[in-house]
């Protein structure tokens, strides 16, 4: 069921306490307390910076619109005084570079990482097919057996960490019509590929939910400050132009989805025929 019928308005909370770093993340996200509760926060001053935060918002909201379980998203405001008592110099550097808007996902207290051997019975084939389709659509390389970015909470799988998705936005100048419509080879490493049901049925389900209008609504939730962040400034004249570039890319990819769907179907067939040949994607 579509989880978003109106233009999304992400809540804005102010960080009040640095709880703990999550050092398994490449960009050192952290659990922060805020006036809205606990959030796993991605920082604009770390890793891929604003682009990772933009990907997190767009992919997370598209996932929710597709009916996939993504924790609540919020914008986390970090004030200049926040974290000054933090003794770790690496964390201090990240916080100093992250004043202003950052992105958080609601902390799922008691959640644990997905392990197919321990929790495979929780994977519904239709859900797995939807997730394979979705990750191929948003070009998300981080859903592998080594790095599934799936959490189990309340006996349900939840999707986290989409900062590596939409990697076309790291080099917009090279993304022409052919590359926009290209398949997604890394889908062969998807952790749920062999668990997935009919990918053509998933295509029918999700294409009906992720309409061009929904894509446009999702893009309205991305703050102008991230789209025009100083680190990526100069690519577009203004935030409206930036949104239009994302919109044109995503709607064209949706219109040409048969290319990534067919490749996913072929990868699924190959993985089932040769289970010992599955690859583990690198970080």
Image (cartoon, rainbow, N blue to C red):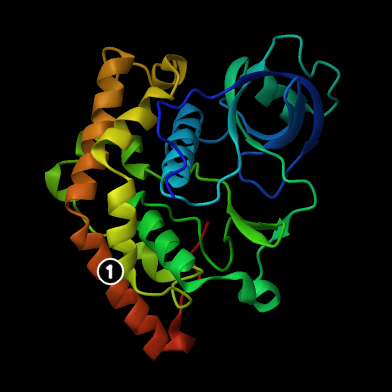
Q: Residues within 10 Å of mark 1 (few under 14, many from 20)?
A: some
Q: Can the viewer see residue 257 in this picture?
A: yes
Q: Position of residue 100 (x, y in %)?
A: 60, 14
Q: Position of residue 200 (x, y in %)?
A: 28, 69
225 left or right, relative to 247: right
- Please give the name of the residue rendered at 56% of the width and 46% of the height, measured from the top-left corner: 70
Query: In this view, which residue lies farthest toward the top?
Result: 80
- Please give the name of the residue rendered at 73% of the width and 43% of the height, measured from the top-left corner: 22
Asked if 32 appears above or below 121 in the picture, the reply is above
Q: Residue 158 appears in which quarter of the rendering?
A: bottom right
- Please give the name of the residue rendered at 48% of the width and 64% of the height, measured from the top-left corner: 127
- Labels in figure, total: 1
Q: Can the viewer see residue 116 in this picture?
A: no
260 left or right, relative to 77: left
**Which residue position holds label 1?**
200
Q: Position of residue 144 (x, y in %)?
A: 52, 64
Along the viewing direction, whichever of 195 and 225 lies nearer the viewer: 195
Asked if 103 appears above or below 35 in the picture, the reply is below
Along the viewing direction, whichever of 131 and 51 lies nearer the viewer: 131
16 left or right, relative to 176: right
Q: Residue 26 appears in which quarter of the rendering?
A: top right
Query: In this view, which residue lies farthest toward the left?
Result: 177
Q: Position of residue 57 (x, y in %)?
A: 48, 34
Along the viewing direction, whichever of 262 and 236 lies nearer the viewer: 262
- Please give the name of the residue rendered at 23% of the width and 69% of the height, measured from the top-left corner: 262
Q: Secondary structure at mark 1?
A: helix
């Amino acid at each position: 069921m579509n989880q978003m019928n109106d233009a999304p308005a992400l809540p804005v909370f102010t960080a009040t306490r640095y709880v703990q770093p999550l050092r398994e993340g490449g960009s050192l996200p952290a659990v922060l307390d805020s006036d809205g509760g606990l959030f796993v926060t991605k920082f604009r001053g770390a890793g891929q910076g604003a682009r990772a935060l933009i990907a997190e918002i767009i992919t997370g909201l598209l996932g929710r619109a597709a009916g996939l379980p993504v924790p609540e998203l919020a914008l986390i405001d970090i004030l200049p005084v926040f974290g000054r008592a933090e003794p770790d110099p690496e964390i201090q550097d990240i916080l100093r570079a992250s004043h202003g808007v950052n992105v958080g996902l609601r902390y799922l207290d008691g959640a644990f990482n997905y392990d197919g051997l321990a929790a495979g019975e929780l994977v519904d084939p239709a859900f797995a097919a939807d997730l394979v389709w979705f990750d191929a659509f948003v070009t998300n390389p981080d859903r592998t057996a080594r790095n599934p970015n799936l959490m189990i909470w309340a006996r349900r799988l939840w999707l986290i960490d989409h900062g590596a998705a939409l990697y076309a936005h790291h080099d917009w100048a090279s993304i022409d019509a052919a590359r926009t419509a290209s398949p997604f080879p890394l889908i062969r490493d998807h952790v749920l590929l062999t668990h997935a049901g009919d990918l053509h049925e998933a295509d029918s389900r999700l294409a009906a939910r992720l309409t061009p209008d929904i894509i446009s609504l999702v893009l309205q939730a991305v703050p102008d400050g991230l789209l025009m962040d100083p680190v990526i400034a100069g690519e577009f004249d203004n935030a409206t132009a930036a949104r239009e570039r994302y919109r044109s890319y995503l709607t064209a990819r949706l219109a040409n989805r048969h290319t990534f769907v067919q490749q996913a179907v072929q990868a699924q067939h190959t993985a089932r025929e040769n289970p010992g040949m599955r690859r583990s994607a690198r970080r």
